[in-house]
Amino acid sequence: MPSSFIPHPSSFQGGGPSANYLQKAAGVLETVAAQSTALFTAADWFSETILRGQLVHLFGSGHSRIMVEEMWPRYGSFPGFNPIVELSLTFHNLVTGANGQRQAMFLENVSGFAERILRNFDLKEGDSALVISSSGTSVVAVEMAELFRKKDIRVVSILSAAHSDVSASKRDDGKKLADFSDLVLDTGAPPGDAAVSIDGLETPVAPLSTAGGVLLVNTLKAEIAQKLTMAGKPPTVLTAPALVGKEKSAELFESAYDEHARRLAKYYADLGK
């Protein structure tokens, strides 16, 4: 697109929904920045796991899957994470019909599903986990955190504190994701997630939880990369050919994926014993 068609940021300052959203997004950035102590702690825990040759387990259902894949694997990321993405909970492309959104939203609140998912892995002492749920009430996400905790695995959660506070638990005991978390990170998204109100429109639009979640995930990733490097074990980072050339990029990809496979293989070797 010609540069003349790209609006300058100042064009949003006069008001309107675009300016409103960007202002709210700036607030999300401030919320993330204010959590530096918690972020450093989470980075310490995750780095310790990776340095032991183990995995940080990642889980999110619905659109929270975005943060899982943002952490690994993509450009600028590195091995040490186990992205647990259940397609029946995250495949939204068809919207309706077979494999539709109704089914996914139903399944993410089926008790016992988390246990069947984790049955596929021989979880280990010293592992850690990151569980993402904007509302902090999705049954599968909450039970996932609960099961990790039962295995003495530290759980960091990413949620919207404001949204979770006003959302009813779907469990009989009233517990939410935060109740099974050793540390909670807040996306800064508002209740209901959508941030912009339009005159004449009954309900707000433009969610913010993904923006906050991605900021949290990549802040963590940067801190972990520094800690691994300072420990003498710099991570193998997936890097684009535009930065390192085609040959080096391919070498990094193969090496990173091989490392991921070796780490993950340990979680299958003694499964069921």
Image (spheres, grey):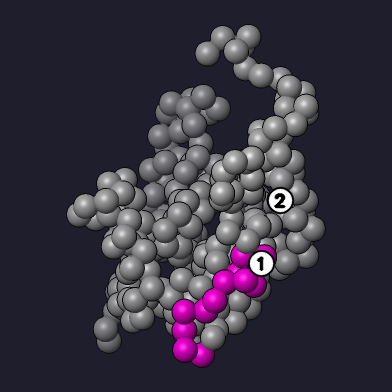
The image position of residue 228, as x and y in percent, is: 63, 57
Q: Residues within 10 Å of mark 1 (few under 14, many from 20)?
A: many
The quadrant in which the C terminus is found is bottom left
Residue under the image location 27 percent in, 46 percent down = 94
Q: Note whether residue 73 is visible.
A: yes
Determine whether 15 is above or below 58 in the image. above
The image position of residue 92, as x and y in percent, is: 34, 50
Q: Which residues are magenta?
A: 162-173
Determine whether 197 is above or below 15 in the image. below
Per the image, the residue denoted by label 2 is: 28
The image position of residue 88, as x and y in percent, is: 29, 61
Identify the amino acid type marked 1.
Ala
Please tell me which of labels 2 and 1 falls first in the chain: 2
Per the image, the residue denoted by label 1 is: 161
Residue under the image location 57 percent in, 43 percent down = 201
Structural distance between the alpha carbons of marks 2 and 1? 12 Å
Determine whether 75 is above or below 130 in the image. above
Looking at this view, is 254 or 211 the one in front? 211
Q: Is residue 26 left or right of residue 80?
A: right
Residue under the image location 47 percent in, 27 percent down = 241
The image position of residue 267, as x and y in percent, is: 36, 72
